[in-house]
Image: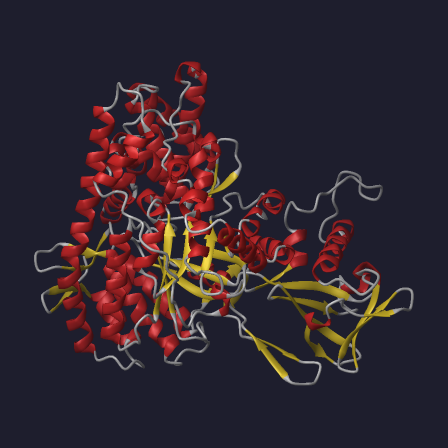
């Protein structure tokens, strides 16, 4: 148990108290006693409001449940349903048009479109890797992924040689030349035919194998170089605001095989990274929260380091420095070496024992996060850190799982108070609004209005959004199979409407419009085929699961000029006048419920297959969460395909099973039998993990298995269908045992 220090009626765990007093406050113009007094005042003011908002959620859900029960045997009327949602305040009136007025937003957020990483802040190594993913080797990303397909060849047959494969390497080189031709086209010829890149008369000069000297079609794409003008070792160019570095070294293993000596092409990749305190971590107590805050402190001070042991070797990982070049005129150029960092706080629901009230109640974790993570970020604003995160003096906080405009207003008020006690200018803290709950989606314009002076980000978190879709309409009927949910009409309306509302409220050139995660990190070829849809939709960023994925996905933003797409969409909107958000978004479509209409056509085997799939994924994630404290990981699915799983995917699986149980498509006995059978499958998938604790056959003794059972059978009563309360309970129980 943590020792606790009493400050102004609140009991603070000593680990948090010591971190703040000994490591965070030194170097800041914030008095220790004043800070803790202000913390108490903030809790006094906002805890009652936080509780009231959660009570409103429950009241609205109860009323929606009652409506479905009352209309169970009647033909469904979309019009009556939506009118009822308006009558109870679930749908709020949409007011006049407006434009956001957010200021001091960094270019990575406001102006440049590109990939965004999301990484568990609790893991220092992952946090550092993501922060350093601003630049990535395209050669490495292609060589190490399934984008490049190996084929039998006359030299090696079907067996690849050990070490470097020159055939595969050549395919990478050819792929990259095609990319350069698309992104940096020449006045004539192709990058395939280049034998020399050099600087001549303060211009980039490119020699082809024909002896011809050519230039870039758009000579403004050339930015700078390293080395000598006659023999540069790096050429820096730009396309759609994104940098491309062509590296030369004829002594290099790769460079010596290339006519121009090109050894690599490095792309500006993850422009921004969300350091996550929420869905991807398992922070269940004061010690965990303190560790998370300590990692954020290291990032904001610029001194976070992690020692890595691999292959018997020890290396120290730190934050990358900025990258330097010379312009053609010999002037120095400096570019950021790291991603712009956001931090995702937790939502309004959960509480933390890091601080207790006088009555020994845990404080709302989201309020605690706002106070501590903002305080830590002041190191960046004050210039006391080794590196600069925000060049415009902003703190970027992503706020998840808010339900409607009142909850966004609460967060805006909270941020105002935090700014006041920290002596920050108003709206220093920028808000990222996760559009991942149904009541936020249908009221998105008014949610943005509530934070119109500080909003810097909206993002369609379609996984949580699907979980909330199921829970909100739990009693309406059985939902479609999980794999078919993405084909339901509400989801396309949701994705399109998010972009249109963002654009019409002034996001272009001021804030990000984001799209969700690619969930299968090993399937990069499929990602390259599919994820180009995000920039084409007008979204200025999209989530990726790894630095490699960021380097591959950024090619889409070279191909698609998102700013032009957004401008075209706005132009079309203006021609169709004021009601476009409502019309384009199709609110009635957004509120359509994805009910399974052909229940009778669903065979017993199809029901069992659906159950098997849901249970296997659920158990695979929960067992790591409860037993090992892993909040996000690549979990093998039922077909042994690795998929990124977090609490959002868990929410879908648990709620879907719960929904089918409620409506009689599954039986209690069937679900329990499947849980036990699939536990053995998950155990076998993890048998090489020496730290893994099996669930079978001692099911009653496995807290992870019991957590899985509760997530399903208590799913209807969980607030908004969230999984956190039950997961935290079991993880804490294990830690305390």
- Residue at 42% in and 18% down: 598
Q: Nearer the viewer, residue 131 or 689?
A: 131
Confirm whether residue 544 shows in the render.
no
Above-or-below relation of 573 to 480: below
Above-or-below relation of 203 to 495: below
- In the image, residue 333 lies at what x, y percent? 61, 80
Along the horizontal axis of the image, is 175 left or right of 306? right
Q: How is the image coloured?
A: secondary structure
Q: Nearer the viewer, residue 205 or 118?
A: 205
Q: Nearer the viewer, residue 366 or 221?
A: 221
- Residue at 27% in and 40% down: 720
Q: Quadrant of residue 725?
A: top left
Confirm whether residue 315 shows in the render.
yes
Give the position of the N terminus as an image quadrant.
bottom left
Along the horizontal axis of the image, is 692 left or right of 251? left
- Residue at 41% in and 78% down: 385
Q: Quadrant of residue 101?
A: bottom left
């Amino acid at each position: 148990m943590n020792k606790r220090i009493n400050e102004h009626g609140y009991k603070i765990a000593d680990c948090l108290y010591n971190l703040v007093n000994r490591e965070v406050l030194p170097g800041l113009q914030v008095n220790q006693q004043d800070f803790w007094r202000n913390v108490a005042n903030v809790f006094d003011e906002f805890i009652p409001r936080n509780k009231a908002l959660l009570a409103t959620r429950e009241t609205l859900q109860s009323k929606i449940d009652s409506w479905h029960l009352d209309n169970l045997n009647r033909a469904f009327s979309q019009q009556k349903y939506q009118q009822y949602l308006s009558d109870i305040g679930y749908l709020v009136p949409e007011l006049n048009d407006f434009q956001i007025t957010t200021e001091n937003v960094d270019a990575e957020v406001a102006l440049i479109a590109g990939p965004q990483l999301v990484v568990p802040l609790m893991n220092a190594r992952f946090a550092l890797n993501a922060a350093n993913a601003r630049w990535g080797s395209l050669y490495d990303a292609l060589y190490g992924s399934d984008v490049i397909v190996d084929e039998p060849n006359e030299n090696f047959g079907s067996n690849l040689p050990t070490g470097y494969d020159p055939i595969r390497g050549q395919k990478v080189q050819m792929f990259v030349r095609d990319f350069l031709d698309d992104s940096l086209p020449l006045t004539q010829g192709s990058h395939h035919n280049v034998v020399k890149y050099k600087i001549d008369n303060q211009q980039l000069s490119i020699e082809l194998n024909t002896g011809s000297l050519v230039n870039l079609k758009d000579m403004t794409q050339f930015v700078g170089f390293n080395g000598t003008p006659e023999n540069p070792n790096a050429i820096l160019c730009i396309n759609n605001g994104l940098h491309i570095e062509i590296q030369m070294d004829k002594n290099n293993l790769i460079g010596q095989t290339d006519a121009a000596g090109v050894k690599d092409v490095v792309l500006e990749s993850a422009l921004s990274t969300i350091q996550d305190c929420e869905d991807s971590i398992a922070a269940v107590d004061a010690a965990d929260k303190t560790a998370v805050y300590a990692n954020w402190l290291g990032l904001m001070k610029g001194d976070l380091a992690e020692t890595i042991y691999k292959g018997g070797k020890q290396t120290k990982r730190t934050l990358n420095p900025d990258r330097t070049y010379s312009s053609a005129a010999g002037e120095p150029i400096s570019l950021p070496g790291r991603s712009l960092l956001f931090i995702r706080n937790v939502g309004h629901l959960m509480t933390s024992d890091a601080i207790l009230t006088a009555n020994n109640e845990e404080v709302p974790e989201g309020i605690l996060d706002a106070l501590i993570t903002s305080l830590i970020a002041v190191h960046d604003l004050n210039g006391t850190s080794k590196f600069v995160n925000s060049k415009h003096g902003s703190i970027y906080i992503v706020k998840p799982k808010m339900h409607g405009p009142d909850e966004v207003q609460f967060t805006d008020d909270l941020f105002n108070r935090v700014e006041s006690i920290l002596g920050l200018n108003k709206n220093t803290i920028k808000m990222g609004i996760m559009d991942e709950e149904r009541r936020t989606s249908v009221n998105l314009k008014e949610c943005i209005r509530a934070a119109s002076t500080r909003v810097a980000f909206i993002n369609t978190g379609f996984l949580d959004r699907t979980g909330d879709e199921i829970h909100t309409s739990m009693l309406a009927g059985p939902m479609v199979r999980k794999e078919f949910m993405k084909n339901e009409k509400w989801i396309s309306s949701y994705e399109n409407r998010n972009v249109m509302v963002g654009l019409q409220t002034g996001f272009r050139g001021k804030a990000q419009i984001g799209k969700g995660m690619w969930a299968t990190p090993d399937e990069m070829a499929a990602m390259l085929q599919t994820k180009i849809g995000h920039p084409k939709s007008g979204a200025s960023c999209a989530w990726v699961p790894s630095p490699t994925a960021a380097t591959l996905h950024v090619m889409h933003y070279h191909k698609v000029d998102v700013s032009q797409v957004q401008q075209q969409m706005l132009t079309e909107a203006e021609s169709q006048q004021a009601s476009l958000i409502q019309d384009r978004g199709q609110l009635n479509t957004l509120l359509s419920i994805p009910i399974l209409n052909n229940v009778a056509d669903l065979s017993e085997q199809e029901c069992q297959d659906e159950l098997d799939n849901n249970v296997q994924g659920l158990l695979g994630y929960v067992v790591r969460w409860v037993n090992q404290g892993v909040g996000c990981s690549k979990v093998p699915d039922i077909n042994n395909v690795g998929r990124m799983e977090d609490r959002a995917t868990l929410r879908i699986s648990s709620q879907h099973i719960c929904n089918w149980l409620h409506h009689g498509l599954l039986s209690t006995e069937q679900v329990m039998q499947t849980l036990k059978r699939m536990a053995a499958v998950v155990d076998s998938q993890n048998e090489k993990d020496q730290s893994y604790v099996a669930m079978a056959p001692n099911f009653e003794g496995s807290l992870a298995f019991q957590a899985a059972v509760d997530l399903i059978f208590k799913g209807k009563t969980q607030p908004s269908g969230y999984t956190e309360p039950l997961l935290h309970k079991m993880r804490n129980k294990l830690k305390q045992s």
